[in-house]
Structure formats: C-alpha cells, structure tokens
Image: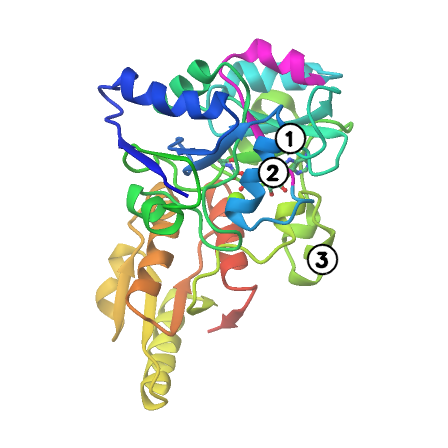
Amino acid sequence: MKTMISNIDVNNIDLKELKKHSKLLSEGKTVIFPTETVYGLGANALDENAVKKIYEAKGRPSDNPLIVHIYSKEEVYDLAKDINEKAEIIMERFWPGPITIILNKKEIVPKTTSGGLDTVAIRMPSHKIAREIIKQSGVPIAAPSANISGRPSPTKANHVQEQMDGRVSGIVLGGDSNFGIESTVIDLTGDIPMILRPGSITKENLECVIGKVDIDPSLAKKEDNKKAKAPGMKYTHYSPDADVYIVSGRQENVIIKINNLIEENTKNGLTTGVMCLDKNKHKYNCEVLSLGNTLEEVASKLFDTLIQMDKQNIDVVYSEEFESTGLGQAIMNRLLKSAGYKVIKA
Ligand code: TXA
Ligand code: MG
C-alpha cells in the first residue's frame, strides 16, 4: 500500500496538508497521527470496514477492543449510555487529556470497534494535531497505539515511519509524544470505578475527585494476567527482541547483581544493556541507556529505550525497578509486561 506521509509542525499546523489526511479518514481509510500519549492508528470508529483495516495493519486480535477518540465532550452522549456523575467529573476534570473512560455503548458503535463487547472506550485527546484531524474528519476515530501488535508503542516519528510505512493510507509525523505511555483506562460501568490500565493520570489523582477507585487486581501477577479485564492487557506486549529482566532490591545490591550478570553474559557471548536512572548510569559495565531522573522522564523514554536496545542488537536487557505508586504504577505495569514478568531478586 502506498502511504502518504506528511511532516506537521505542532506549533504551526499546516491545515491544508492535514486536511489530506482527514479526507482519507472520512473515506474509510487508515491514518496514523500523534497524540499526547503515543501515536495512534486511526480509522472511522463507526465504519466496520474501516475499523477492520486497523486490525489488519496492526496484526491485532479482533477481540481486543479499540479506543474511540472524540473532538468534543458532547460526542460521548452519541456513543454511550448510562453516563453517571463520576464519568461527568472525569470528563470535566481530565479531558482533553490522557484518560479513557469505559461506558455502556449505544447501538451506533459497531461490535468490530468494541471487540464484541457491549461497552465502549472513549478518549478526548489534547494533542493539537490529534484534535484537528478528528475535527476535520467529522467522525469519531478509533485508534489503538500505532505499533505492530505486541511491540512497544511508538512515541517518536521515526518509530512510526520504520514500522508502519506501507501498512496504512496516511502517516502524520508530528514530533515526540509528551507522556510516552498510553492513557489510563478506567471502567465506569460498575459501582466502584476500576482502572484497567494505569497511566499518567494516577489512582491518586482520580481518588481526589471521584472517591474510591480500584485497580484491576489481575495486573499484578503473571498467573492472573489472563483474567485481565481489558482484553489488551492479556496479550504479550511491549516486547523488544531482547530478553528483558527487572532487577529488584536495594539499590547497591541491584548494581552488584547486574554487574555480575553482565560478566556472566559476556562469557557466554551475549551483549547486555541496562536501563537505569541517570544518576546510576556510570555504575554499570556495559551499554547503558538512561531513562532520566524523574518518573515523568522514565515514562516518556521507556518505549524508545526498548526500541533502541533492539537497534543495537542487544541480547539481554536489565532494568532497575521503580516505585509502584503514582506514575510508577504505570511504568512498572509496562516494564513487567515487556519483561514477561521476569524479575530477578538482588
Ligand atoms: O493513549 C492511548 O490510549 C493510545 C492513544 C493512541 O490514544 N491508544 C491505545 O489504544 O493505547 P490500544 O488499543 O493500544 O489500547 C487500548 C486498551 C486495550 O488494552 C484494550 O483492550 C482496552 O484499552 N479496551 C478498549 N476498549 C475496552 C472495553 N470496552 N473494555 C475493556 N477494555 C477496553
Ligand atoms: Mg496498544
């Protein structure tokens, strides 16, 4: 497939160029565009044939539902029913932004979009290019992360171009994503709201405005993972070619343990990479990719770092562990999945 690729400056959007892509979307074709979380692979959410093209382009299982992206809050009432007060508060407080709400769907949303479920996931993104392209296309846009299924989500223009050229009708390149991990997904159909995928809007942030929030308990352990309530959380995900491990324990022990493992790998002819906080990068005796100093930096660099490890043909990657509250919860969720839940105790 011939892909139309455009570079758009987010601070000076070329509307004429962007219109070519929204036209593709209104014609039932697929277009990749940047959002504030990760790049999305979009198509008209209300057109089953268009949505099927998303599943094909990603190689995604058809029972894994898509997030519907909207331009204005009012569109929620066209797509979903039983919209409760907690949903209204979240929309008011956090939209546009990196949170997706799950509500009971109306008939208009095809089952192809909802992966056969009676619910629909909806998000109003804040990224200027995403907002403009959705507005111009005139329809709600179903958009999963724009990676081949199972791979790390794309957060930079080059990730998209390298993976997806030829698989979609259009690609809008618009620089780096701000947050770097996908939106928080929260199910609002039960009595107590439940986070099905942690993200930049944390449990703590949500509890401040809507009271008690649960987290899907099956996210914590590999054994429970097949019971995950968001179908997408069951699959292998964020996996680079390299074998990833998280090394957990007291910092000084983690450093000793990883350096011992590096020595062993070198003897066995394997190249090793380490992902760590910037302050520790001089302490390891191998290829080190710093994830930055703050949790925000770690979140924004995580997927790119995993992708870079593959480019450097690294066989084994060790990552330091991060705290599991606040934004750390989303980071550890992605790291555990990319490591296939392999944790080494130091
Ligand atoms: O930040 C994001 O959310 C990005 C950007 C492009 O907006 N999109 C994204 O979509 O991450 P995707 O398809 O890669 O992840 C959506 C997740 C999957 O785990 C899916 O199973 C879950 O949300 N999901 C979608 N609809 C659902 C529903 N009705 N019930 C339960 N889980 C749902
Ligand atoms: Mg995804």
The local secondary structure at tag 2 comes to helix
How many residues crowd mark 2 within 10 Å: few (<14), some (14–19), many (20+)? Answer: some
Q: Is residue 57 left or right of residue 257?
A: right
Kindly check if marks 1 and 2 are in contact, taking CB atoms under 8 A apart as contact.
yes
Residue 52's tag is: 2
* Residue 21 screen position, x and y as percent: 38, 25
Element class at badge 3: helix
Outermost residue toward the bottom? 267
Q: CA distance from mark 1 to mark 3?
A: 32 Å
Q: Is mark 2 within 8 Å of ligand 1?
A: no
What stretch of residues is rendered in magenta? 65-80
How many residues crowd mark 1 within 10 Å: few (<14), some (14–19), many (20+)? Answer: some
Cα distance in 3D space between marks 1 and 2: 6 Å
Q: Determine the residue positioned at 55% across, 12% down.
A: 73
Work out whether 43 lies above or below 92. Answer: below
Mark 3 C-beta to ligand 1 under 8 Å: no
Image quarter in which the N terminus is found = top left
Binning the other alpha carbons within 10 Å of mark 3 as few (below 14), some (14 to 19) or many (20 upward) gives few
Which residue is farthest front?
1
**Which quadrant of the view contains residue 118?**
top right
Is residue 219 shown to the viewer in this render?
Answer: yes
- Residue linked to disc 3: 224
Q: Where residue 48 is drawn, which disc sits there? A: 1
- Amino acid type of the residue tagged 1 in the rendering: Glu
Q: Residue 149 appears at what percent x and percent y?
A: 53, 52
Q: Nearer the viewer, residue 9 or 301?
A: 9
